[in-house]
Amino acid sequence: MAPKQDTRRKRTAPAGGGRRKSCFFCKSKVDEIDYKNVGELRRYVSERGKIRSRRISGACRRHQRQVAVAVKRAREMALLPYVAEGREERSGGRGDRGDRGRDRDR
């Protein structure tokens, strides 16, 4: 009887064919990111209000940290929202927690 082969495979990094994003702030030679420049900061915040990661935004480590601090300051000054505007109905997933006690027998 032949020995069993291991069917699991190790994941490898994707063979890079894509280009790495260059930091917008490094290209523009920006030293400090201003929290009052909301138009520029909106690019680094998702529709849901989350700060986008470096992998998605393409910012370098130094500027991504400055973006995060600037977004947090802009939120504190009510220039940017903490979360999305309206709450949409979700399909599937976890149930609505507000309906817990309605179907119980009293």
Image (cartoon, helix red, strand yellow):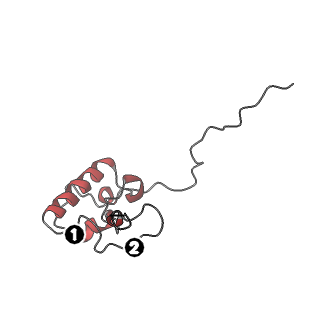
Name the side, left or right, on which 14 lies relative to 72: right
Badge number at residue 38: 1
Question: Which element carries disc 1, helix, strand or loop?
Answer: helix
Q: Quadrant of the C terminus?
A: bottom left
Q: Nearer the viewer, residue 49 or 92?
A: 92
The residue wearing badge 2 is 89
The answer to which of marks 2 and 1 sits earlier in the sequence is 1
Q: Is residue 75 above or below residue 86?
A: above
Rendering quarter of residue 101: bottom left
Q: Nearer the viewer, residue 74 or 98?
A: 98
Q: Nearer the viewer, residue 59 or 90?
A: 90
Q: Nearer the viewer, residue 27 or 94?
A: 94
**Mark 2: amino acid:** Glu
Question: Which element carries disc 2, helix, strand or loop?
Answer: loop
Rendering quarter of residue 34: bottom left
CA separation in Å, label 2 and label 1: 29 Å
Q: How dense is the environment of label 2, judged by Cα within 10 Å: few (below 14), some, or many (20 and up)?
A: few
Foreground label between 2 and 1 = 2
Q: Position of residue 22 (x, y in %)?
A: 40, 56
